[in-house]
Image (cartoon, grey):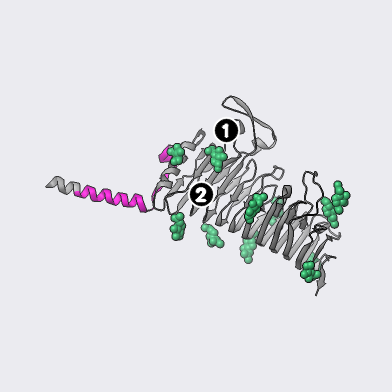
Amino acid sequence: MRSVLVSCVLLCILAWCDFEIGYGQMTYNVLDHGAVGDGHRDDSEAFLKAWNASCLDKGTPRLVIPGEKTYLLQPTNFSGPCQSSSIHVEISGKLLAPSPDAWKECVDLWLTFSEVTNLTVSGSGEINGQGSLWWNKYDLLNYVNNYKVQCERPKALRFYRCDSLQLSGLTLADSPRTHISIQYCNYANVSYLQIRAPEDSPNTDGIDISMSSNVNIHDCNIGTGDDCIAVNNGTFIIDIKNIACGPGHGISIGSLGKNGDHNTVENIHVKNCSFNSTMNGARIKTFQGGSGYARRISFEEITLTTAGHPIIIDQYYCPEHDCENSTSSVQVSDVTFSGFHGTSKNEQAITLNCSQSVNCVNIVMNNINITSAVASEEVRASCSYVNGTSYATVPQVPCLSSKA
Ligand SMILES: *[C@@H]1O[C@H](CO)[C@@H](O)[C@H](O)[C@H]1NC(C)=O
Ligand SMILES: *[C@@H]1O[C@H](CO)[C@@H](O)[C@H](O)[C@H]1NC(C)=O
Ligand SMILES: *[C@@H]1O[C@H](CO)[C@@H](O)[C@H](O)[C@H]1NC(C)=O
Ligand SMILES: *[C@@H]1O[C@H](CO)[C@@H](O)[C@H](O)[C@H]1NC(C)=O
Ligand SMILES: *[C@@H]1O[C@H](CO)[C@@H](O)[C@H](O)[C@H]1NC(C)=O
Ligand SMILES: *[C@@H]1O[C@H](CO)[C@@H](O)[C@H](O)[C@H]1NC(C)=O
Ligand SMILES: *[C@@H]1O[C@H](CO)[C@@H](O)[C@H](O)[C@H]1NC(C)=O
Ligand SMILES: *[C@@H]1O[C@H](CO)[C@@H](O)[C@H](O)[C@H]1NC(C)=O
Ligand SMILES: *[C@@H]1O[C@H](CO)[C@@H](O)[C@H](O)[C@H]1NC(C)=O
Ligand SMILES: *[C@@H]1O[C@H](CO)[C@@H](O)[C@H](O)[C@H]1NC(C)=O
Ligand SMILES: *[C@@H]1O[C@H](CO)[C@@H](O)[C@H](O)[C@H]1NC(C)=O
């Protein structure tokens, strides 16, 4: 009789536990799954174990990475689809990439989250790519399984096919290449990030977005020496707000239309951003020879401090100087630049260099006052093959019809 009662109670407890494991908010701590966090031993296996456990949890699990520790991680894929209705990854510690000669394989990505819906990655932790060890050696030679191979510099953090993504609070530092890449994600909110790399680090974009829609990026401080944010092909409905950008290359749409590609970008809105000592400010760049469009784009309430090219549309973009002339081009239309104030480093503060065959259409400038960073110098605008309207714009843009 007594044993029946005990079994009954046990059964109930088990059932309750099961219920908790199945549908509650369970915590999976990487330290409980074997992570050491000494910055030397490889913690990737422990992270994957904790990830797998979270991903199989049918509730709303939290994957916890405690602070005051440094976790060395080899290239790792945190992949779904998961059973969970949401997963919250809380990063308090520091994630460290191996030095280039210690990568176990040559891959172009360090940390990837793929095919996870309702993923939140947040915390006060840091993701550090140890990029300085890569930047001075473009042709890094690595030994993988005793074969000498050439590794490309990897991107630090990628989100691939992650719908309803939240990313906030973290610091990203010194990625070997792009810091954050968002691809094929629908509905993402990226906020309160610090992204830092030295001004002279190569191709270290802050955030790159492609093939994604409904992405909000706000309240981030980005200074990496390259594009703070680059919005690329296949992106729609992107809102970028309250970004302090610099040093770097500004916020860019593109580059688009490389190698004759058909590219489309639409409904991109950038508001209340500052550009401090950047090479560009608001930029749209396309290669000759492409097709498609970049349209319904706005840059509003922009503060400039010694920005190189505060406003630039360049349809002859060609960083390697090896491009052929072509009459086709990605069409740029319905672009508004409004509320730009501050100083330009270059005399040519506004550049609208549009395609001779596929002109820029309906470019609007409103309430713009850009002065020279050098006292007593004037700034000017240059433009070709563009139509549109300007209101209260200094310097005056000759191609646009000026209205009071
Ligand atoms: C995690 O799950 C994947 C896919 O099920 C499996 O291939 C891998 O071995 C697991 N890794 C660990 C460390 O449990
Ligand atoms: C991660 O997944 C990508 C494919 O999405 C693959 O190319 C890469 O080798 C994987 N990396 C690791 C470390 O498993
Ligand atoms: C994601 O979260 C929403 C809202 O909580 C929920 O309705 C939806 O089912 C979740 N998606 C998945 C794949 O679990
Ligand atoms: C994005 O996430 C942050 C932090 O979780 C939150 O404060 C903010 O309201 C969210 N923004 C949007 C547009 O959802
Ligand atoms: C650009 O994005 C569109 C989706 O909008 C896609 O159909 C097309 O294949 C992409 N082009 C390239 C060259 O990737
Ligand atoms: C504009 O952005 C800055 C951060 O660069 C922020 O401090 C400020 O509150 C924002 N202003 C508004 C009106 O949101
Ligand atoms: C611009 O950046 C410099 C150097 O990082 C900093 O000292 C200065 O305060 C910044 N200016 C503004 C207006 O943010
Ligand atoms: C390409 O076009 C530009 C502008 O029309 C012209 O200045 C340049 O000479 C052309 N280059 C070649 C290689 O035809
Ligand atoms: C446009 O760009 C081409 C190629 O970089 C250059 O030759 C030309 O001078 C530029 N035109 C203007 C008006 O800046
Ligand atoms: C533009 O800004 C400068 C410096 O702040 C100021 O002196 C000038 O009056 C402004 N011009 C216009 C047209 O608002
Ligand atoms: C710009 O060009 C388009 C298409 O040719 C035309 O519909 C529009 O009226 C032009 N706008 C101005 C301000 O000239």
State the separation of the CA atoms marked 1 and 2: 23 Å
Q: Which residue is mark 2?
A: 115
Residues packed near mark 2 inside 10 Å, few (<14), some (14 to 19) or many (20 plus):
some
Q: Along the horizontal axis of the image, is 124 left or right of 258?
A: left
Above-or-below relation of 109 to 299: above
Q: Residue at x 61, y 44 (%)?
A: 173
Q: Earlier in the sequence, mark 1 or mark 2?
A: 1
The residue type indicated by label 2 comes to: Glu
Q: Along the horizontal axis of the image, is 285 left or right of 13?
A: right
Out of 268 and 279, give the one closest to the viewer.
Answer: 268
Residue at the bottom extreme, as displayed: 404
Where are the magenta residues, as a range?
A: 8-35
Above-or-below relation of 129 to 377: above
Secondary structure character of the magenta stretch overall: helix
Q: Along the horizontal axis of the image, is 35 left or right of 385?
A: left
Residue 130 in which image quadrant: top right
- Image quadrant containing the C terminus: bottom right
